[in-house]
Amino acid sequence: MATKKKKVLTYNGKPIIRCGNRIYYGDLNDKLILVLDITNTKNVNGLETATEVLVQVMDNTGEFGKGQVFRKATRDNLYKALDIGEWWLKDAIKQFNFA
């Protein structure tokens, strides 16, 4: 009997996992991940839209989602948050030689 594999949403080849108002980006086996916390939303034409997102590059070697924060900032929408966060994550992995 064949088993179905769940498809995971990806951005630039890395998985994105949402758990409530928290979004994890990056390979969960890596030592660093990107954590996006949606802190504020507004209703636009019946659709909840993020208006404030906390961006954090976080250590992933301890308890999941509770590691040391290396960089953080706030952006006014999800696209801007993911854009800067993805660049920071690549830079941090390269800087700390985790690649």
Image (tube, rainbow, N blue to C red):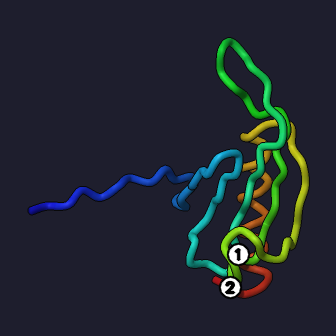
Neighbours of disc 1 within 10 Å: few (<14), some (14-19), many (20+):
many
Q: Is residue 17 above or below residue 62?
A: above
Inspect the image, locate mark 2, and give the three-letter code of the amino acid beneath it.
Phe
The residue positioned farthest toward the top in the image shown: 45
Q: Residue 8: horizontal and vertical position, in percent?
A: 44, 54
Query: Does residue 15 appear to the left or right of 69 in the view shown?
Result: left
Of helix, strand and loop, which one carries label 1? strand
Q: Residue at x 79, y 81 (%)?
A: 95
Of helix, strand and loop, which one carries label 2? loop
Q: Quadrant of residue 32?
A: bottom right
Query: Does residue 71 appear to the left or right of 23 in the view shown?
Result: right
- CB within 8 Å, label 1 to label 2: yes
Q: Which residue is mark 2?
A: 98
Q: Is residue 1 above or below residue 81?
A: below
Q: Which residue is mark 1?
A: 32
Inspect the image, locate mark 1, and give the three-letter code of the amino acid beneath it.
Leu
Discs 1/2, front: 1
Q: Residue 38: horizontal and vertical position, in percent?
A: 77, 44
Quadrant containing the N terminus is: bottom left
Q: Residue at x 63, y 83 (%)?
A: 99
Neighbours of disc 2 within 10 Å: few (<14), some (14-19), many (20+):
few
Q: Residue at x 79, y 24 (%)?
A: 42
